[in-house]
Amino acid sequence: MRIKNDFIIIQNGKKQIKLHNTILNTYISKIINNQLTTDPDERASLIMNYAYLKFDSSLEFDKESNLQESDFDLKVIYYTTNTDISPKTIVNNYFYKVDNSQYTVYNISSQSYITDLSNYVGKKITAIGFGGNYQAQGIIYACVDTSNYNVYIEDTNTIFSIARRDIISTDSIFYTPNNVKGPIHLSDGQYHYDGGFPDYQLVGILDSVGLGLNSYKMDIGISLNPYEEHIEVQTNKIQLLDELVIEHYSDGLFPNLDIYPSTDIYPARIIQKPLYPSNDIYPGIEVYMLESPYQYIQLKYKVYKIDTIDGTTTDTGDYYLLSNLIGDKEKIKMNIEYEEA
């Protein structure tokens, strides 16, 4: 699974600058943690509600930095966002705006809203951060260094805005028999709105790992609940401790090489029903087994409904699968790794 920042566009009056930010490991760790629990005290919002501005002095950071909102000067409160969920990708779009309106900009050091930007006119913006609210508690999820660009608040009448797009993608095959748009554990969930406000959200919680002949069905599985006994959580990886063993079927017995000329006709690991000369030579599945070995290793996610008003969590009974082709491995582990594209 890969995550990348598609772009950041800074609009400063008539000037426009296009950049890419660094997505921090703190954000990836929140994605991992959120797919393991429905506990509201442990889950964090993955929505980057706020943009943060730092002036004058540069900010040293890399993807392993633990940045806080206290590392910045101003917090931009005004934002809009939308999320596009599909079976392969999660696309998050954000738009932030700075102006003299009330309650759009917050001074972090004085802990107060400001409506007059005159104190910041002519000051160079050296870094822009992005973070969430609620349980995120002022943690920065992504940051871009702007110290090498001439980005200023030019005057109090200039509208300063930031647009950004993040894309999270997976190569796994997605399947659900239910009303789930895609791998919602990679986002902040699938929100449902009533009258313009979110009524509830659907979230995906990792439930089991298993094997399947087809991508739409898990034939055997191992429950990962409680996950502490089956999973080692790392910064950018979920390491599954359970090992699945695939038993290869034997080549089968056959009368002679003329009737069994090659593995093209009777392959040891077959997908289609094999060919055989007659029922007399093909006495039963004990001799020439018809069943195929498992083709996919799969992760199953249970879908929970979280009420956005009172926070109550309900098991919907729905689920979705993420499947990956096995190949010729006999012993396999399914690890979930995140990398910046």
Image (spheres, helix red, strand yellow):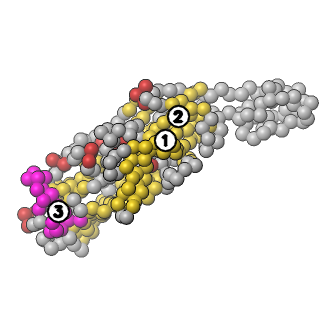
Task: Give the number of the disc on residue 302.
Answer: 1
Task: Give the number of the disc on residue 216.
Answer: none
Q: Magenta residues?
A: 97-114
Quadrant of the rendered image containing residue 257: top right
Question: How many residues crowd around disc 2 within 10 Å: few (fewer than 14), some, or many (20 or more)?
Answer: many
Comparing 124 with 91, the one in front is: 91
> Are the residues flagged by discs 2 and 1 in contact, CB closer than 8 Å?
no
Comparing 141 with 101, the one in front is: 101
Which residue appears at 39% of the width and 37% of the height? 37
Q: Earlier in the sequence, mark 3 or mark 1?
A: 3
Comparing 319 with 46, the one in front is: 319
Query: Would residue 122 be visible to someone looking at this image?
Result: no
Is 124 contained in the magenta span? no
> Are the residues flagged by discs 3 and 1 in contact, CB closer than 8 Å?
no
- x then y, percent, for residue 153: 15, 66
Residue behind mark 3 = 103
Secondary structure at badge 1 equals strand
Quadrant of the rendered image containing residue 245: top right
* Amino acid type at image mark 2: Val
Give the vertical position of 248 relative to 199 (above or below).
above
Residue behind mark 2 = 209
* Amino acid type at image mark 1: Lys
- Find the distance from the CA under tag 2 to the CA under tag 1: 12 Å
Which residue appears at 34% of the width and 51% of the height? 308
